[in-house]
Amino acid sequence: MTPLTFEGRFGWLHEAAGTTGVLLCGAQGYEQLCAHRAWRILGENIAALGFPTMRFDYGGAGDSLGSDRDPARLADWLASTRLAVRELKSRTRVDRVVIVGSRLGASFAAQIASEDRGVDGVALLAPVASGRAYVRELSVFAKMQSQPGERPAHVKDEPGLEVQGFWLSPETQEQLRSVDLGKLPASPAPKMLLVAPDEHTSADMLANHFTQLGSDVARAQFASYAQFIAEPTFSRFPEEAFAAVTNWLSKEFSEGANTSPVEPKQLAETLTAPDFIEEPIQFGPGHKLFGMLCRSSKPVTDAPTLLFVNAGANPHIGWARMTVESARAFAGMGVSSFRIDVAGLGDSPAMPGRKAQVMYSMETIADVAAALDVLTARGLSNFYIVGLCSGAHLAFHSAVADARIKGLVMANLQKFIWQEGYSLEVAVRNAYRSNTFYKDQAFRADTWKRLLRGEINVVGIGKTVSERLLRIAASRVEALMGALDIGPPNDVTRVRRWFRALSDRGTRMLLVYSSSDGGLDEIAQFMGVGGSQVNTLPGAGISIIEGGDHNITPRWARDHMFGLLEEFIRKAA
């Protein structure tokens, strides 16, 4: 698996010796964020069959240059797809190409293949048949995810649609409404595969349309589609749907497969913009870990070097692409950074011999140390580590273990100590807000209306609040016992000693919480209500994002987070 760049886009080549190449066209925005890890595994599986396989990020998405706020998004996405086909042919010298697309990527695949007639096969996974219906679906989803009444008063509406932090301008929405696979005038390819969920009402129409255009259309069910595009932490690899793809490829294009071993190339590829140069780096044991080094074109002397780690199961681009955007904005201020995937997440395969659960695993501290080794070898220093949720847990324990880390930023940390036997159910307590939030909401009339409509999980909230209150009460006893040196060390005394050790070492610390996040009860348990014990430590402090959600999703909340991080870094210069 080799990282590559082409005309401002970023991609991956999964090497194989075959003469039929496969291009993977992923979904867009939030859907592709959810599917990222599974998409990588599909690429690996197809290459293992002997087909050279390439996947890529569209312009303005993932690690590619640009922004979702750039104009002419649809034209750029289609152009990215055409360029990717050309790049696959150039990099591998294949003589036949098959395109496998998911959701909007399937629509792009069908459209460009229909236009250029040089594609031998197209597989469509849950394709967006109607752009008009797709925009309508996204609008409904965005409204379901919105949290009215929590946004600060100074934040004004702007025309457009924000879907889990990913932006669609009015122009882009209008362009998408023009997408209609049922009106393609020519067959995308001689051989096609349509993999669609049961509720995909347009599947029969598409199959009939492509058959009438002269394609040989095979069909398969996408039974686990909903689990596939679930939030990254809980997204499931769709075994049966992806098996349908690999089986179809093996059956229809077997003459172009070759399973002879191919040695991956080590390429010196970069993405260049006025403020930065980005270099994809494979590092760690066997060069299996992945990170993107973003070096400032005009570095400020003695400025910190930022290390961004995964939040939950999000890949290194971050939730709503916030890590990419932050890294490049800081590069404009003279600050370089490294955004990484620990083993088992994003573009870093699982590490043999490690536990299956990656999040909250102390083993991933070794991946952070390996990343620091890479940065040190390139002459960088003064490392500040930044993490959200489970990434904050990793950042904290990495800082405790490695004195090279001079600064620590933890956002919406849910657990300071992960006990053996915990399940990831604990990791999603962000579904429940802070106890203070529920106390305040109890006096609102609309809360009682929602309660009567059955929209509030009273049992779940009650259980969570009770558990937190019990833990906070127990922690006060543990803290008192620690202060009096009674009994063995307990979790509260351990966490407080770690904080003191970091402060004594000169490590600067910033904890950030959204105002209703459940992590506020975690900090209350270990460091006093409101983190009072944190504020007594030199170089440490707590900031609150009023109205923010757990993932810091809305643009205004991300801007607030960026401002806090910028202020924290400027004080270090």
Image (tube, rainbow, N blue to C red):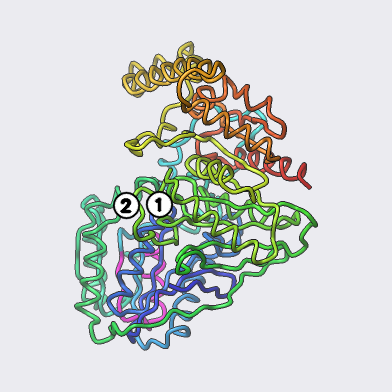
The quadrant holding residue 122 is bottom left
Q: Amino acid at mark 2?
A: Phe
* Residue 53 visible in this rendered orientation of the protein: yes
Q: x%, y% of residue 56?
A: 47, 68
Q: Is residue 528 above or below residue 550?
A: above
| Prevalent SS, magenta region | helix
Q: Is residue 108 magenta?
A: yes
Q: Is residue 340 magenta?
A: no
**Mark 1 and mark 2: span between their CA atoms?**
7 Å
Residue 34: assigned label: 1
Residue placed furthest toward the top: 443
For the point 53% across and 68% down, the residue is: 10
For the point 41% across and 63% down, the residue is: 26
For the point 66% across and 66% down, the residue is: 378
The quadrant holding residue 270 is bottom right
Q: Amino acid at mark 1?
A: Cys
**Quadrant placement of the N terminus:** bottom left
Q: x%, y% of residue 490?
A: 46, 26
Dot placed on the residue nearer the N-terminal end, 1 or 2: 1
Which residue lies under the disc numbered 2? 228
Is label 1 in contact with label 2 (beta carbons under 8 Å)?
yes
The quadrant holding residue 179 is bottom left
Q: Is residue 356 above or below residue 181?
A: above
